[in-house]
Image: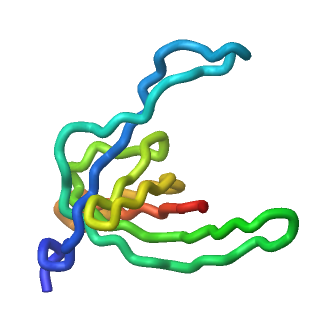
Amino acid sequence: MSLAGLMAHTLQVYRNNPTGTDDYGHPAGTIDPVLGTHPARFQHHNSWEDREGRLVQVQNWRCYTTADVDITEDDMAYWVEEARLFEILVVEPVANSTGTHHKYMMLQEVF
């Protein structure tokens, strides 16, 4: 099966847009979607819960998308069909003999 056939999900990139500083002098801004959506494949990798002090669940996901998607570790990945927003830990271009074939991302969701 081709890579295009495996990409059954839709990715939207969210990018931080700094607008100034907050009352404490820290950078402030909004996280806005970048125009357009991209074919992708999201896969659950692992998850765990922290029960000491607070109830936190952390899930790690993998995402594959086409090589032309403009995305970095400073952005966030939004899975359109599931309405889930992920922090991007790593973006790795995957190359073959003709150049970059696709991009692989390690994602994390905390709730």
Where 74 falls versus 100 (above or below)? above
Quadrant where the C terminus lies?
bottom right
From what the image shows, is residue 73 above or below residue 65? above
- Image position, residue 20 (x, y; %): 53, 13
User: In this view of the protein, can residue 101 be seen by the observer?
Assistant: no
Q: Residue at x 14, y 86 (%)?
A: 1
Left or right position of 108 against 71: right
**x, y percent for residue 47:** 60, 77
Front in this rendered view, residue 39 or 48: 48
Q: Nearer the viewer, residue 76 or 104?
A: 76
In the displayed structure image, the side of residue 15 where residue 100 appears, left or right: left
Q: Could you say which quadrant of the image residue 91 lies in?
A: bottom left
Residue, x 54% and y 70% (percent of image)?
60
Residue 70 placement (x, y as % from top left): 28, 43
Q: Residue at x 33, y 61 (%)?
A: 79
> Could you say where residue 73 lies in the image, as x and y percent from the top left?
47, 46
* Residue at the farthest right position: 53
Depth check, front residue: 58 or 90: 58
Q: Residue furthest bottom?
A: 1
